[in-house]
Image (tube, coloured by chain):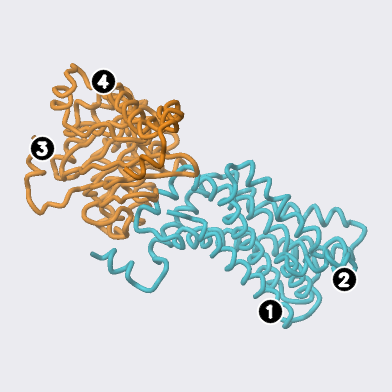
Amino acid sequence: MHYNDHSAAPGDLPAVAAYGLGVERGAHTLLRNVSFTIPRGSIVGLLGPSGCGKTTLLRSVVGVQEATHGHVQVLGHPAGSPRLRTRVGYVTQAPSVYGDLTVLENLRYFSAALGLRGWRREDAVVRVVKEVALTSYADKMVCRLSGGQYSRVSLAVALLNRPDLLVMDEPTVGLDPMVRRELWQVFQRLAAEGATLLVSSHVMDEADRCDWLLLMRAGRLLAGADRQSLLRHTGCTDVEEAFMHLVRSAAAAEERARQRAAEPFLPPLLARPGEPEGARTPLPADVLS
Amino acid sequence: MSHGRRRAGRLPFSPTITGATAVRVLQQISRDRGSTALLLGIPCMLMVLLKLMFHDAEDAFERVGPQVFGIFPVIVMYLVASVSTLRERTTGTAERLLTMPVQRLDIVLGYSLAFSFLALLQAVLSTLLAVGPLGLDIKGPPYLLMIIAMFGALLGLALGLLVSAFARNEFQAVQFLPAGVLPQFLVCGLFVPRDEMQGVLSAVAKVMPMTYAVQAATEAATHTGVTGIFVRDALLVLGCVILVLVASAATLER
């Protein structure tokens, strides 16, 4: 598989490597001790229920969210470093493009923001419009497009500079199955061309299209594996079931850990009823012997 | 890489990106015909209103007419700028731009450039209307009023940019107008001369930028040629604009 090919190549820096990443905002812990690596050229699905910290993790990878613990390396540089700004594409959950401009105007502006000029700019704009199949809507105002087309404009912006790493936050949420399939075809082509894709989703059936899965719950990483070994390991038939299995065993492990953590405090508590007994034995004798 | 080289340069902004941002902001505003008409028309409409209000008091019109050149553009531009930059922050486009090789000053200067252009149009229109059909009689050359109107508009823009960092939504941004701009409007010397105000208030008025815009406009109206006070006041307003712009650039975070 894709994943194995790439992990085998020595000296090939991973697309993303997170080491003990933790993010706290005020009293809330959004991410706790998250570590993983993503090899180049793979499609990685970040799965988990809404509110489990997927967006925070993606923002940390892109470098717009500062880590309170640990760190994230992206393509061999610390996340958010200036060198990465033209190499990482980020598609936010809500499409972040200008609704009151046309598709082309949006793309021209963002390509200028990426530092593309002259024919390179026009070239890039034409290419991405074709890639996301919006050619016949190029001169339309973005706010007049349908939801799916709107998010494809946002995706197109991220493709302008042929990023090495494309980070996408629920790019297919709320889209009809046809559009979803088309988008996944685009993703697969990009990965085949060597780009690395990190895609979050709370729809578990999208796992089938990913080379590697990261399962998250409540700010923790439950598992990182390819689909086959995940299913084999958990003995389940689909990813959703496997996820539930992992959640249950994680909860059980937490419970055990809590009990174990409480143990050192137990002996003194249990010893207390025996104290009078100990007091009865003459202390000096003990000390002297 | 070319980006690497450019980032390594001395400039804290890139002229191409700043220019592209200005063009993009103007494109957005020109699409919204209603806003453009309001932006350019409101100061003119208010001038006409003022003229009719002081129909039988020509002296009062001669006094107040120039002063409002330091006031109306601030308010009008403040509203447009705060809402449009707030929209940029809340839709995530600002964050997206900052993940690209865009620097904070590119965004702030791009907006400033675009709104300066609109401010210039607004200032020319309202000055021509005032000294032409409305017959506002000023001693100094009319272009001084245009300069003040433009600086006032820039002040409004800068305040709007800054406020958009603290407002969570459009309602709050608009609420900041009575909180931050109207007090300046009240103590700037339009209603009561500043030296007749209560001590603390006249001291407060001395640190409000709008006071100097109004004073400069009065100066232009009552003296022929450019006076030292006019230059000083205009520079003070411009200094405030730069200060507030830098502060608002600092509020844009990655």
Indicate the quadrant containing the C terminus of chain B: top left, top right, bottom left or bottom right.
bottom left
**Which residue is drawn at the image coordinates 37% and 40% (left, top)?**
A285
Which residue is tagged 3?
A: A2
Separation (CA) of disc 1 from disc 2: 21 Å
Q: Amino acid at mark 3?
A: His
**Relative side of A62 to B105, left or right:** left
Label 3: few (<14), some (14–19) or many (≥20) C-alpha neighbours in 10 Å: some
Image spot of residue A14 (x, y percent):
18, 48
Q: Chain of mark 4?
A: A
Separation (CA) of disc 2 from disc 3: 79 Å
Which residue is tagged 2?
A: B195
Chain with colour cyan in the figure: B
Pointers 1 and 2 within a single chain? yes
Q: Chain of mark 3?
A: A
**Residue nearest the viewer, comparing A52 with A272:** A272
Q: Earlier in the sequence, mark 1 or mark 2?
A: 2
Chain with colour orange in the figure: A
Q: Amino acid at mark 2?
A: Asp
**Residue nearest the viewer, comparing A225 with A12:** A225
**Which residue is drawn at the image coordinates 13% and 22% (left, top)?**
A232
Which residue is tagged 1?
A: B231
Q: Amino acid at mark 4?
A: His
